[in-house]
Image: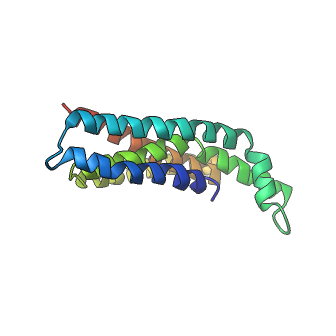
Amino acid sequence: RVVQVPLGVVGLAVSFAVLPTLSRFSVGPDTSLERYREALLFGLKLVLLLMLPTFAILAALSQPLVAILFERGAFSPAATSRTAAIFLAYSPQLPLTAIDWLLINAFYARQNARTPVTVGVVGVLIYLVVALATIASLGAVGLALANAIQNSSHALILMFLLRRSLP
């Protein structure tokens, strides 16, 4: 939940706000590759401007944040420590996952839904490899790390493919 809140507030909001502009400049009478790029770059800069400090703050305050939000009743200080460690493994994906949602919409605006889905399948394979390699030694932290690597690699692959597809 702690990871999903900033992603929803920033990542989804920016990607949905930029989608109509990307669509307008991608197809139709207003087609302009230069304006499409400008809108996409604006969205990327905005996401990074908002998500990088959010990531830093959440990572730095992971232990007290988890304690404040969850530590009561059967949720002990030991559970707080384990949950904070898992949260730290998830947190590096925050900026890249927010960028990923924007890039997915950038592909959709270009009438290309196949590429994000194909990259998603590759992401599942990446997750399986990392999860199987880390679960024995790291447990739940390894699964969280595998998820962070999966989501981050999805964004990086989409960024590479989009950059390559734009002349």
Would residue 21 be visible to someone looking at this image?
A: yes
Q: Quadrant of residue 73?
A: bottom right
Q: Quadrant of residue 44?
A: top left
Q: Residue 156 in the image: state x and y as whole percent.
A: 39, 38
Q: Is residue 68 left or right of residue 138?
A: right
The residue at the point 85 percent across, 65 percent down is 72
Q: Is residue 137 left or right of residue 108?
A: right
Query: What is the quadrant of the N terminus in the image?
Result: bottom right
Relative height, residue 18 to residue 5 (above, below): above
Between 125 and 162, the one lying in front of the other is 162
Between 25 and 74, the one lying in front of the other is 25
Would residue 122 be visible to someone looking at this image?
A: no
Q: Residue furthest left?
A: 29
Q: Residue 138 in the image: state x and y as whole percent.
A: 64, 47
Relative height, residue 70 to residue 18 (above, below): below
Q: Residue 121 in the image: state x and y as whole percent.
A: 33, 54
Q: Residue 85 in the image: state x and y as whole percent.
A: 70, 47
The residue at the point 30 percent across, 55 percent down is 117
The residue at the point 46 percent across, 48 percent down is 151
